[in-house]
């Protein structure tokens, strides 16, 4: 016969085991629609002890090896992770405060970063390790500025022939074009809401999927995406089902738009909407930099500032937040 206390202990253990088996377990967070599906990867991006992201008010890109590069306003202006979230390195102490737009360009056998710096009123080209190769100053030749302080570039795009486009998203809403040797070519856009005019051209991207490549512009405060020919002629509004588009990127069969007003939009290459994902249900948390960590929720974005599709189809989203927030969405379909 078992001792009464032993019998009680066994019974309690059995009950606890049964309760644990029936307790709710952490469930995967999946963002999906009829056409797309992504798994939200909680806690992606592990930093070394004592290091924090700080304000994330820039962009995110992925190189051919799957490494992820993102901007912060701290002395860690560019932080690099492996695809699994392992920290690799950081660099850019001299670029702290204002590194805003970033695009990755493959040139020959190499890959390079083109960086827009709002605080310095400049554009830089660097290696993936942070060596600055050249700096492009404010476009005096455009004759639309009295001084450099009126120019605050937010995004850069590079055509296949090396032609360079710079969006003055936080300045006077112009786009400036340079040839591959960085000689000034022309300026187009400018403030306004009519076709061809812009209100905060926050992000730009060259869509080379059609017969003729076009420059796509996230015309944020006009709540639309416009298309321009590569010589600056307006071609039309190509997307309006957006709130405050900040940046767009294309890879494979998809286009992704980071929308500052609390969600991302996934489109096909024809810019037809497939899904709005991660929509924050609380308008007070959208397009806000100061949302504290305890109010973050997996599956809900705050203020998407940049989104990038990796070569394997995964999507990385950088929220504009004073603490810094980066999210990985693993593509399921």
Image (cartoon, rainbow, N blue to C red):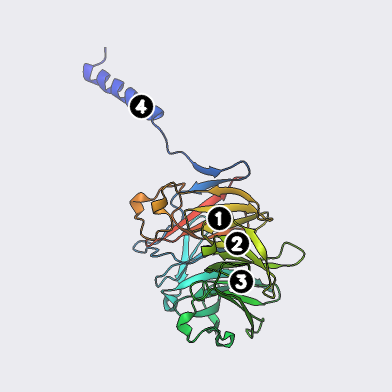
Q: 150 left or right of 254? A: left
Q: Nearer the viewer, residue 61 or 275?
A: 275
Cα separation between marks 4 and 1: 46 Å
Give the foreground label among 2 and 3: 2
Nearer the observer: mark 4 or 1; the answer is 1
Element under label 4? helix
Of 237 and 327, nearer the camera is 237
Which mark is nearer the camera, 3 or 4?
3
State the separation of the CA atoms marked 2 and 3: 15 Å
| N-terminal label among 1 and 3 | 3
| 298, above or below 82, in the image | above
Q: CA distance from mark 2 to mark 1?
A: 8 Å
Image marks 2 and 4: residues in contact by CB distance under 8 Å: no
Label 2: state its secondary structure: strand
Residue 225 image label: 2
Residue behind mark 3: 157
Image position of 124 (left or right of 6): right
Where is 144 relative to 250, above or below?
below
Q: How far across and down, in percent of the image, does residue 49 sit?
A: 35, 61
Quadrant that contains the N terminus: top left
Q: Position of residue 279 (x, y in %)?
A: 49, 48
């Amino acid at each position: 016969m078992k001792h009464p206390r032993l019998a009680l202990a066994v019974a309690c253990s059995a009950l606890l085991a049964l309760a644990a088996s029936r307790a709710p377990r952490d469930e995967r967070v999946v963002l999906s629609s009829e056409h797309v599906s992504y798994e939200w990867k909680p806690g992606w991006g592990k930093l070394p002890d004592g290091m924090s992201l700080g304000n994330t008010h820039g962009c995110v890109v992925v190189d051919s090896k799957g490494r992820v590069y993102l901007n912060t306003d701290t002395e860690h202006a560019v932080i690099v992770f492996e695809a699994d979230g392992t920290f690799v390195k950081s660099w850019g102490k001299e670029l702290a405060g204002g590194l805003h737009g970033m695009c990755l360009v493959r040139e020959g056998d190499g890959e390079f970063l083109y960086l827009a710096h709002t605080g310095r009123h400049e554009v830089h080209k660097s290696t993936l390790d942070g060596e600055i190769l050249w700096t492009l100053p404010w476009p005096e030749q455009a004759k639309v500025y009295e001084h450099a302080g009126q120019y605050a570039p937010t995004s850069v795009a590079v055509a296949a022939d090396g032609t360079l486009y710079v969006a003055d998203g936080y300045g006077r809403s112009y786009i400036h074009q340079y040839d591959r040797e960085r000689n000034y070519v022309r300026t187009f856009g400018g403030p306004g809401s009519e076709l061809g005019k812009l209100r905060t051209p926050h992000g730009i991207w060259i869509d080379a999927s059609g017969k003729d490549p076009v420059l796509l512009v996230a015309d944020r405060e006009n709540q639309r995406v416009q298309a321009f020919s590569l010589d600056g002629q307006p071609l039309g509004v190509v997307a309006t089902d957006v709130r405050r588009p900040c940046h767009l990127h294309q890879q494979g069969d998809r286009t992704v738009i980071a929308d500052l007003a609390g969600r991302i939009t996934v489109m096909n290459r024809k810019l037809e909407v497939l899904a709005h994902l991660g929509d924050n249900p609380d308008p007070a948390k959208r397009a806000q930099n100061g949302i504290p960590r305890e109010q973050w929720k997996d599956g809900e974005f705050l203020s998407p500032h940049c989104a990038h599709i990796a070569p394997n189809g995964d999507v990385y989203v950088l929220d504009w937040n004073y603490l810094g927030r980066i999210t990985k969405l693993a593509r399921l379909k």
